[in-house]
Image: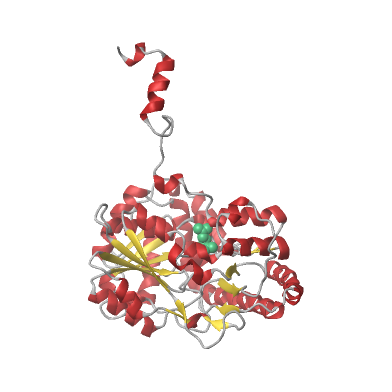
Amino acid sequence: MSSATVPAGERAAAAATAGSSGGLPKPSPLYAAAGLDVWTMMNQAAASVGAVNLGQGYMSFPPKDFITRAAQEALAENSHNQYAPPRGRPGLLEQVGARFSRLLGRDIDPGSELSVHAGANEALLSAFTAFLEHGKGEEVILIEPAFDQYTPNVIMAGGRPVYVPLRVRTTKDPAREVVSSSDWKLDPAELEAAVSSKTRILVLNTPHNPVGKVFTREELEEIGAVAQRHNLLVIADEVYEHLTYGIEHVSIATLPGMWERTITVGSAGKLFGVTGWRVGWAVGPASLIAPTLSAHTRIVFTTNTPLQEGIASALCLAHDNDFFNVQRSEYERRRNRLMAALDDAGLPYVVPDGAYYLLANAASIKIPKDYEFPSYIEARGYNFKLAYFFIKEFGVSGIPPTEFYSDAHKALAVDYIRFAFCKTDEVLEEAARRLQKLKTHLQCSD
Ligand code: GLN
């Protein structure tokens, strides 16, 4: 009997017994159980009570006029509405090449040592895809806290994440005193112990999200030495390279012997405060960029044309109008405003030397035993409850940093909450005003 002659009811019944999910298409386990991502969850929770949103790291201020104008002009040019070459628009490659030639102190060939991506996220996914083989148990070392996209991206590319956490090394008590992001240290021995014969890649994020740590040259030399001893590819996520406060950002690719084994990833969204444009890039030797570009070609084919052109013009103009120095001082002022608000509220924190996040230590906050949480928060553990408590009780939202840790190391972050300070003065002032309520809370719960 052909399928056309089988009665519809019987066909449905046969289909129902064919699969364990009642004959319906079954998703990959990687996505089947996935709940809301932390960004959406916290944005929704914040919006539901009108909290001041210091959660997701997007700018609450508009980009400078010259940036949006560059994009508008690019969009008005008819030829900018069609596919870009997979590697990227020549004008953007040239500008990014010039920027990296200065930053890395070497002549970057835009035609072989660069690729443009749909945001830094996609550059990372392309690099993982290009250098990991499925089914071989290849390992990737992630330094915790690790941006929440790294783990799923490594797994999608067939790799296995192995985690090495930063450890707080200071004589101070971080629950009571302000500490420095430089007190969060990577133990080189712990790093080396995590390397196995299957390790292929080490991911390094500096300046670091969420700690705000800017790795020193000495620290990078130690990490580089491990990478060289074990022939690892280093993927350097340096999307905050333009935002350091009184401390020098060093690219690991500039250290002796490291250019050959490093893919450095950057972001136009971070550089110009346009995180929705989704334009990023990867730079490295042709031997590393060629396979990354091949993966990119198969993942998204190309990055959108008009915004590549807009960024190319903006990069050109930014160097003439000292944009990056002005921007850096604006962010430093925002950082200082948030730190002053926390000082005033009596909440200790980790001073960020770079990027636009700050970890506050809320160990002194006592959540009443009978406090009610929605089930989606309850299920995610104490750190999520803490973030929710801040939203409901103080009207300020942050991100629970345990989301940046594997289960084995979540305990290291349970008392922290991440606040983003890429926000307007008005938003930061309102957050400061609301955080005053902490004072009464801390007195009452003593
Ligand atoms: N990088 C930003 C942050 O850490 C945004 C993350 C995201 O939305 N995926 O807040």
Residue 270 appears anywhere in the view: yes
Image quarter hosting the C terminus = bottom right
Q: Position of residue 416 (x, y in %)?
A: 57, 71
Whole-percent x, y for residue 131 in the image = 27, 59
Which of 8 and 219 lies nearest the eye of the viewer?
Answer: 8
Residue 3 occupies quadrant: top left
Horizontal side of residue 316 vs 88, given as left or right: right
Q: Nearer the viewer, residue 378 or 330?
A: 378
The mark tally for this picture is 0
Q: How is the image coloured?
A: secondary structure
Task: Report the residue at 48% width, 70% height from top.
Answer: 240
Check the picture and name the quadrant holding the N terminus. top left
Q: Quadrant of residue 389?
A: bottom right
Residue 172 to residue 281: above or below:
below
Is there any visible trace of residue 313 in the rendered image?
no
User: In the image as oriented, which residue stretches furthest toward the front?
Assistant: 369
Q: Give percent across and percent down for residue 185.
A: 43, 80
Left or right: 117 as drawn, with respect to 325: left
Q: Residue furthest bottom?
A: 171
User: Residue 47, percent across and down?
Assistant: 67, 54
Does 179 appear above or below 330?
below
User: Viewer-proximal residue, 161 or 63?
Assistant: 161
Instruction: Name the residue at 41% across, 83% down.
Output: 216
Using residue 231 as the reference point, say whether residue 395 is left or right of it. right
